[in-house]
Amino acid sequence: ESASVFSAKWQPSEACQPHMDEEGRVLSRALAENVVGRIGGKSAEVTAVQHKPGRQAPPLPYSLSALQIDAGKRFAMSAQQVLDGCQSLYEKHKLITYPRSDCRYLPREHHRQARDVLSAIGRMADKLQAAVTGADVTLKGKAWNDAKVNAHHAIIPTLKTLPPSQLSSHEAKLYELIARQYLLQFYPDHTFTKTSIDIAIAGGLFSATAKCVKEMGWKVLLADASKNAKKKGLNATQPEKAEADESSTQYLPPLKVGDVLQCQKGECVEKNTQPPSAFTDATLLAAMTGIARFVTDSEVRKVLKESDGLGTEATRAGIIELLFRRNFLVRQGKQIRATEAGCGLINSLPKSTTLPDMTARWESLLNAIVDEQASYGDFMGSLIPLLHGLIEESCATLPVALKGVKSAKPAYRKRRKKAAPGKTRRKKLAA
């Protein structure tokens, strides 16, 4: 019966280590084919069964970076477009709270306004009316935490409403994202049971896993959003993609240790490793906020995890736009790639200035000043000689990496005014 058929993955033994890479991938096709040839039609005994209940709380309300990342994935908006749209929703329309926040938590006293905020969402976003109706305002999850609220709390809708027709397309999309993220706080946890089994076949160990959803909880809102996005040809956000993957997880029949099954066939799947994907607006922002992932030194990684990463909530969009204006970065569809000039610049600089380690060192010194363990003089005393050395080094000679690199053309050019009818304009040759 089809419902009783499932796939299990081979778990190579210690003896296979010489034929595997550091990530556990088998490199020898002959070895894999040997295993496939041994297991077809053979009996399979269940040696271990584990059922593990799990739950997943709703994702927190948005900070600016989190919103920029989701809007980039869902609507292919640039970081600057998100910032500009949010600034308009905040200053012009008064529909959302302060948008440049780096906080994802809310003050506990704000929970008293929840019912009124939900009512405003229902009037502003037709697509979310059903979600507003299904929300349970008595829920008070981890998002409501005074200890984690700093100068500004998370970005959420305000009590104000206006005719939705007054919003631009970008503004309406951003408001809906912010409102849905707030609504998630009033839905129960997503609960599931994860089952894993081990199977012995012809002396080899195989494993299979499956995930059975018990209650969709807050994910029902993202599932609905994903359906609407597909109808419009938009991208699903990362949580929605994860949900789609989970729903396609295989079914495992009820099994217990000692059960004997039969292996119908073995299959050898050959794959190639892929180079890292090019950055998009969303993944570049995620890399800037999670720069610690790219550092191997544990102490440096610890400092970067505790900092804001590269830039701040208010400056990251500007940093990216500046690189485009100077033609160090270029867009190719949704991808962001470095230009020849950008690569030449990085390759010409001392390596220490291109690594996040320097940011970590400065953060450590600044934190020491805050803790009164260092002074302003200590910080500047180490910084000034470093800058003098870098400037002298770069002025001494043209770096080899920049030789032959054409000067970067500006990313944006002003349009020339059209000549009046009957008149001609002589083209000026570039010097």
Image (cartoon, grey):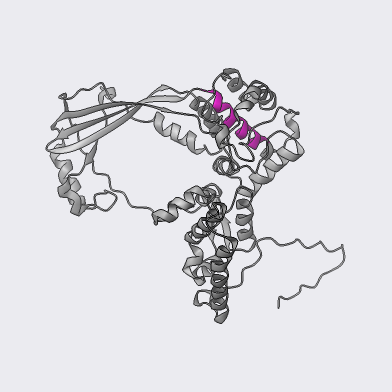
Question: Is residue 265 in view from this perspective?
Answer: yes
Q: Which residues are magenta?
A: 172-187
Please tell me whether residue 82 belongs to the stretch shown in magenta. Answer: no
The front one of 149 and 407 is 149
- Judge whether 118 appears above or below 235 on screen: above
Residue at figure coordinates x 65%, y 34% from the top left: 175
Determine the image quadrant of residue 7.
top left
Q: Quadrant of the N terminus?
A: top left
Q: Quadrant of the C terminus?
A: bottom right
Taking the image as shown, residue 241 lies to the left or right of residue 270, namely right
The front one of 371 and 429 is 371
Residue 33 image offset from top left, x and y in percent: 18, 46
The front one of 240 and 161 is 161
Residue 164 image offset from top left, x and y in percent: 72, 30
- Judge whether 324 appears above or below 78 on screen: below
Taking the image as shown, residue 23 lies to the left or right of residue 238, namely left
Residue 4 image offset from top left, x and y in percent: 25, 24
